[in-house]
Amino acid sequence: MEKTRKTIALIAHDHKKEEIVVWALKNKNILEKFDLCGTGHTASLISRATGLKVKAYLSGPLGGDQQIGAHIAEGQIDIVIFFWDPLESQPHDPDVKALLRIAVVYDIPIATNKATADYVINSSLLK
């Protein structure tokens, strides 16, 4: 059975969580047309702020990035919005790189900053 709605994964490193919440609030009317998921704390922050249903996986350091990657490989996630912090060392950096790699391997859009997320979410190709 083919999915009727696309799924967007929402992820943010600690220093970017406020930024992704503000972005999600600004784009709430677009995001409500999609199934949403995300890593632990990010998913709960966005859900609380926007009122949107965001399926929460584990936090990134506890395996959430790997869970998202597995769902990409299974064809269950269509787009990743990942506000990552390239200036901050992450204890789970190998998981972050694996997630970025799997998104490229499966040729799904992955936005790693606000500017790219704006382009992706407003693209005429996004239906």
Image (cartoon, grey):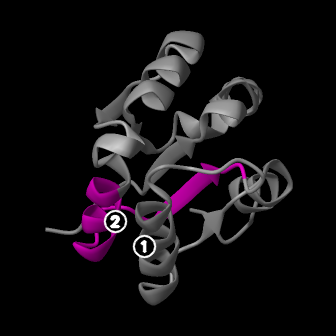
Q: Taking the image as drawn, is residue 62 in sight? A: yes
Q: What amino acid does circle 1 point to?
A: Ala
Instruction: Tell me the magenta residue range.
Output: 66-85
**Residue marked by disc 2:** 69
The residue under the point 34% across, 65% down is 69
Rendered image quadrant of residue 127: bottom right
User: Which callout, 1 or 2, points to the residue nearer the camera?
Assistant: 1
* Side (left or right) of 100 relative to 21: left
Of pointers 1 and 2, the one earlier in the residue sequence: 2
Choose between 106 and 30: the one closer to the eye. Answer: 106
Residue 106 vertical placement versus 39 (above, below): below
User: Rounded to the nearest whole Å, what is the CA distance between mark 1 and mark 2?
Assistant: 8 Å
Within-10-Å neighbours for mark 2: few <14, some 14–19, many 20+: many
The answer to whether residue 109 is left or right of residue 78 is right
Residue 94 screen position, x and y as percent: 44, 67
Which residue is found at the position 52% from the left and 83% from the top?
Answer: 104
Which quadrant, please, contains the N terminus? bottom left
Q: Which residue is mark 1?
A: 98
Element under label 1?
helix
